[in-house]
Amino acid sequence: MGYSAEVVRRASQRLAEAKNEKAMQTRAKLQEVYRELPRVRQIDSLLIKTMAQAAKAALSPEGEAAMAAARQENLVLQAERTQLITQRFGAGYLDETPVCDRCSGAGYLGSTMCHCLEALCAQEQKKELSLLSCGQSSFRDFRLDYYPDVVDPNTGYNPRQIMEKTFEYCVQYARNFNTQAPNLLFSGNTGLGKTFLSACIAGAVTEAGFSVAYESAPHLFSKLEKARFTDDPELRRQAEQETRKYTQCDLMIIDDLGTEMGGQFVTAALYALVNDRLLLGKPTIISTNLANEELEKRYSMQTLSRLRGQYKRIPFIGEDIRVLKNRGF
């Protein structure tokens, strides 16, 4: 999962806090046992002594017999300790249960992120999406009645029928998402639901445990520019670390392409990001109000070629929903 460094940092911090909380609970239980059963404290002190005796015995000529005696004393003490605690508090009262059965709270199995840390990363990522209103968008709130159920004489299409197919495709895309999912180009005029449905997909895919980066085009290119041109080495390092998620995440969503300030840097950065994700086989969703002719004028032919050839176009047609809402629809 290509989670950002900040998401992993926050998730790791939460995992460490959970481990500390577990340890504190165990220590509190032990202190309670010591208060209620002073004999257990004595036994724990004796157990430490028997271990020291066993270590010393290993170095003496009569080591084997001494070690056997120390082990036997240790077993007797442990049995007494278990019996006392079980009678007073119940079986397994002081058993230590790790925060995760697989990694014991380390967060990784070798170099692979454990599912416990992945789950926390997904939660932290969902918080980020919620701040962008992505996590609050739901397919169940999408309204097809905003789209006219009559044939548009200018296009020859029925907007509601088109949007019904678009909506169903987005639902299935999110429901069946995997890292081999197709790239999508949401295309249509402003106010037709492109941002809303892309946010719905972001929220659903995050819920399924995949890493998602969601940025508006102006914000995206501003971050990329900062990572490229800042003079402060530490700020550059932080910016590069943060923006690396755009290439590595399972799903990248660029909203409102074409609303950013144009220029050579934007043209080059968009091509690099689109091309890198294609080479890595990682799906991307781009939404834009621009028609093909406008895309061709604004960006490079190499970028447009990839958008035309390797992105599935998802049409959005109808009337501006914001205008309809202002009319009281």
Image (cartoon, helix red, strand yellow):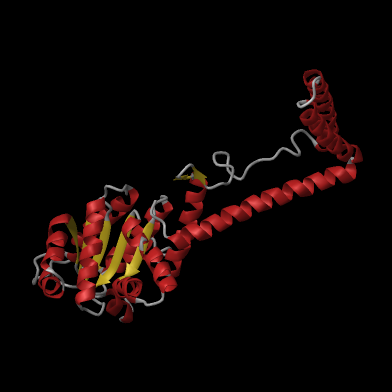
In the image, 230 versus 149, the foreground residue is 230
Give the percent coordinates (x, y) of residue 200. 36, 61
Residues 27 and 294: in front is 27
Q: Which quadrant is home to the C terminus?
A: bottom left
Which residue occupies the extreme front position in the image?
61
Q: Quadrant of residue 56?
A: top right
120 on left or right of 56: left
Residue under the image location 41 percent in, 50 percent down = 208
Residue 288 lies in what quarter of the image?
A: bottom left
Number of residue marks:
0
Q: Is residue 112 above or below residue 270?
A: above
Image spot of residue 305 (x, y percent): 12, 61
Residue occupying image coordinates x 8% and y 72%: 154
- Image-based side of 275 in relation to 102, left or right: left
**Residue 39 higher or lower than 9, as above or below:** above
Q: Residue at x 52, y 60 (%)?
A: 10
Toward which corner of the image does residue 57 lie, by quadrant? Answer: top right
* Nearer to us in this view, 244 or 175: 244
Q: Please tell me whether residue 13 is drawn above or below residue 175 in the rendered image.
A: below
Give the residue at x 19% y 76%: 264
Q: Is residue 49 left or right of residue 295?
A: right
Residue 142 visible at all = no
x and y, in percent, of residue 226 in the image: 35, 75
Q: Position of residue 114 (x, y in %)?
A: 49, 45
Residue 237 in view in this figure: yes
